[in-house]
Image: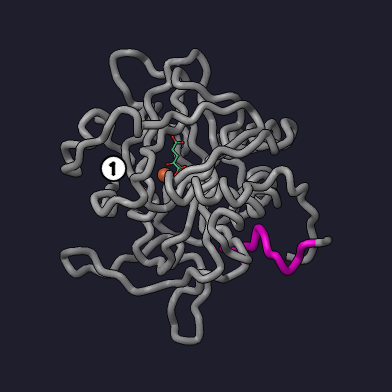
Amino acid sequence: MSTSFHIDPSLLPSEDDVRRYEETGYYVTKTVLPHDLLDRCAVAIAEHHQGRRDHKLPKARYTDWKPGDGDGVRNNEFCSLQNDGVKELAMFPVIGAIAARLARSPLIRLFDDQAIYKPTDQGSNSNSTVGWHTDHSYWSTCTSNKMLTAWIPLHDTSVANGTLTVVEGSHLWRESEHVRQFNNVDLESLGRWIGRDIPDSAIKPIVLKKGQFSFHHMRALHASAPNIAPYPRIALAVHLQDEDNHYQPFSSTDGQPIVLAHDQLCRRDENGMPDYSDPCVFPTLWSERAVTA
Ligand SMILES: O=C(O)CCC(=O)C(=O)O
Ligand SMILES: [Fe+2]
């Protein structure tokens, strides 16, 4: 990162906000993102769906919806590395500055991002659901316990348009650890499968105005219900690393080594392991060292 930044401190979470994030596993920002930045990202995602790529990635196993892949949720991963209009939003400095406070980290790097387009639900099917999961369950090769996701809708969100829903406090539950059901449309049976009573009051749909966004902790359970509004719900999920995160070898229960797409895309370190600080794949959003007074 060559530039230095000044961020209005009133936009950042206070120490009380950070403590609340540590207890609840999520945080809602003030209205901090310019509308024209969000509108440019909406155009960039629409062009991405039509096949535009500013940069082509090496072959790796990631999801990148294209026409013909069905009319359910469109999930485009590593979108900001491929599309400059998406990158402009993903790298917007205030996102990293807020994340740095929440994670209590002097530096924040991208891990990856997902453009998520949720079409209007057709009624009889509920294929615009995103199922319960924790982001960490997809990142078992990460050493960190402090990674987090900025969930940035490109317009107002509500229960009707299928906003993100977080289970308050679930980042502290042992039962959340391996919940990995992004594609499971059953949102009702979470308590039963994880073997824990979940009070209705812990289920928090995050209602946001355009320009606001939310963060959730890597171990927080989250999902989103079908979009019954008459227009698509579009959001960019920006997954972030704290400074200390690095790669660790990890195997599935059947002994197979886990290989993330990240591991296929990034350079190797001196031990031949994936380097999660490779600036080409994991650019720095925010560093205290680049802040102007
Ligand atoms: O946009 C959604 O509904 C899901 C987003 C998500 O899973 C995330 O932000 O980690
Ligand atoms: Fe997620």
Q: Depth check: 103 or 112 in front?
A: 103
Query: Is residue 288 in the magenta section?
Result: yes
Q: Quadrant of residue 243?
A: bottom right
What is the count of numbered marks? 1
Residue at 48 percent of width and 68 percent of height: 245
Name the quadrant of the C terminus.
bottom right
Question: Is residue 78 at all visible to an observer of this figure?
Answer: no
Left or right: where does residue 162 sit relative to residue 278?
Answer: left
Q: Quadrant of ligand 1?
A: top left
x, y percent for residue 139: 38, 59
Residue range corresponding to the magenta coloring: 280-291
Name the quadrant of the N terminus.
bottom right
x, y percent for residue 204: 41, 31
Residue at 39 percent of width and 18 percent of height: 121
Left or right: where does residue 26 sit relative to residue 189?
Answer: right
- SS state under label 1: loop
x, y percent for residue 101: 60, 55
x, y percent for residue 130: 36, 34
Residue at 43 percent of width and 78 percent of height: 273
Task: Name the residue tied to disc 1.
Answer: 181
Question: Is residue 210 at all visible to an observer of this figure?
Answer: yes
Residue at 22 percent of width and 68 percent of height: 256
Q: Relative to 169, does residue 69 appear above or below in the rendering? A: above
Visual colour scheme: one colour
Q: Quadrant of residue 211?
A: top right
Amino acid at the residue labelled 1? Gln
Q: Residue furthest front?
A: 16
Query: Is residue 168 in the magenta section?
Result: no
